[in-house]
């Protein structure tokens, strides 16, 4: 009888606990950084649960905020964000310090959240972040960490700063700690399609077995076979040699693309203005001896004087100098992730 009542979601809270570190090139330090975390849909994951971020720098009074979908168009709208961490940290210039959330951030499969890490400390050395070097800051089987904005003001969401409050094409430096909760297989096309090819092959094999002696599986009804498959994890079926070679080739190709994007970003000076060129020259001709925290950080006055001169209409609150519409269409995720 139990074979007729199959579970849809695993009954343990989290199946995988993962900690991933992003690349760290020590490009910049200032007051904050916004970015996105996306729960990928390639695997049968019900949701991703982010429990903490880790950062380094002079730190101080830190807060972490999240918003459904993305930070885009919300970087100065405090009411659109939920605070998940608030605490004071002593400086930690080289070691990552964890910021444990009061409640985990839940990101449903195929959805994303905007994340904002900020320090109220005065000065420009609070949080380390990098120039954007590729399409994604980090990508694995479960999540993508996207690029975003850097914030130069020590007041959260503040759009005013003598040098301009925001910098585009920046990326998070630190660690993301998260767990994944898996779906269980069921004879539903929408569920079946999310499972890897080797698992789908096992399902087809079970259903093609003809009744025969000395094969107990062949004596079982489809309901019993479905119950067995329902209790199997998605990764219990290893790929065959041919598929394994194909998957490795796809991973190598993706890694080569990422490396090419990174190399192109290294060769091209980021942004515009005199200080960006100075930063590029420093990296290429003296970067190895330059300290990570230096007053000559390129998030400085020169980088925005030209931008402010060209932004005479006073609307420079956004990263692109234009106002964002308050009316946004709701995503297929129904508002994206949230606090669990």
Image (tube, grey):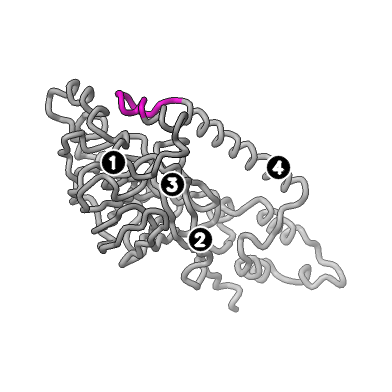
N-term-proximal mark, 2 vs 3: 2
Where is residue 234 shown, x and y percent of the image? 61, 60
Determine whether the residue tagged by mark 3 lies in a helix, strand or loop. strand
Label at residue 329: 1
- Label 1: how many Cα within 10 Å (few below 14, some 14–19, many 20+): few
Residue at x 50%, y 66% (from the top left corner): 9
In magenta segment, residue 269: yes
Q: Which residue is mark 4?
A: 246
- In 3D space, how far apart are the residues under numbered discs 2 and 1 (Cα atoms)? 32 Å
Determine whether the residue tagged by mark 4 lies in a helix, strand or loop. helix
N-term-proximal mark, 4 vs 2: 2
- Label 3: how many Cα within 10 Å (few below 14, some 14–19, many 20+): many
| Side of 13 relative to 43 (left or right) | left
N-term-proximal mark, 3 vs 1: 3
- The vertical placement of 288 against 209, above or below, is above
Give the camera-side residue of 54 and 68: 54
Residue at x 41%, y 36% (from the top left corner): 132
Q: Which residue is mark 3?
A: 145
- In 3D space, how far apart are the residues under numbered discs 2 and 3 (Cα atoms)? 14 Å
N-term-proximal mark, 2 vs 1: 2
Q: Which residue is mark 2?
A: 18
Residue at x 79%, y 73% (from the top left corner): 216
- In 3D space, how far apart are the residues under numbered discs 4 and 2 (Cα atoms)? 25 Å
N-term-proximal mark, 4 vs 3: 3
Number of numbered discs visible in the structure rendering: 4
Outermost residue on the bottom side: it is 1
- Label 2: how many Cα within 10 Å (few below 14, some 14–19, many 20+): few
In magenta segment, residue 301: no
- The vertical placement of 209 against 193, above or below, is below
- In 3D space, how far apart are the residues under numbered discs 1 and 4 (Cα atoms)? 39 Å
Determine whether the residue tagged by mark 2 lies in a helix, strand or loop. strand
């Amino acid at each position: 009888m139990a074979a007729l009542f199959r579970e849809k979601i695993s009954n343990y809270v989290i199946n995988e606990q993962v900690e991933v570190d992003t690349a760290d090139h020590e490009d910049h330090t200032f007051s904050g950084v916004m970015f996105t975390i996306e729960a990928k849909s390639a695997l049968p994951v019900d949701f991703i649960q982010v429990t903490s971020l880790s950062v380094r720098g002079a730190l101080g009074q830190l807060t972490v905020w999240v918003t459904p979908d993305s930070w885009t168009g919300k970087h100065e709208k405090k009411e659109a964000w939920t605070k998940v961490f608030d605490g004071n940290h002593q400086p930690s210039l080289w070691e990552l310090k964890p910021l444990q959330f009061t409640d985990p951030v839940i990101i449903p499969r195929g959805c994303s959240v905007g994340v904002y890490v900020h320090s109220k400390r005065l000065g420009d050395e609070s949080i380390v972040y990098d120039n954007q070097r590729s399409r994604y800051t980090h990508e694995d089987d479960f999540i993508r960490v996207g690029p975003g904005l850097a914030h130069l003001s020590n007041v959260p969401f503040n759009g005013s700063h003598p040098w301009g409050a925001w910098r585009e094409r920046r990326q998070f430096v630190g660690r993301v700690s998260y767990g994944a909760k898996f779906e269980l297989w069921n004879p539903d096309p929408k569920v079946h399609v999310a499972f890897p090819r080797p698992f789908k092959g096992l399902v087809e094999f079970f259903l093609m077995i003809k009744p025969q002696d000395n094969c107990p599986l062949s004596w079982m009804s489809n309901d019993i076979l479905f119950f067995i498959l329902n209790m199997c994890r998605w990764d219990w079926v290893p790929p065959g040699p041919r598929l394994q070679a194909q998957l490795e080739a796809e991973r190598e190709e993706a890694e080569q693309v990422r490396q090419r994007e990174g190399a192109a970003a290294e060769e091209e000076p980021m942004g515009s203005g005199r200080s960006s060129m100075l930063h590029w020259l420093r990296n290429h001709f003296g970067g190895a001896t330059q300290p990570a925290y230096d007053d000559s950080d390129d998030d400085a006055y020169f980088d925005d004087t030209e931008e402010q001169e060209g932004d005479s209409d006073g609307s420079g609150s956004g990263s692109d100098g234009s106002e964002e519409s308050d009316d946004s269409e709701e995503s297929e995720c129904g508002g994206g992730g949230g606090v669990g």
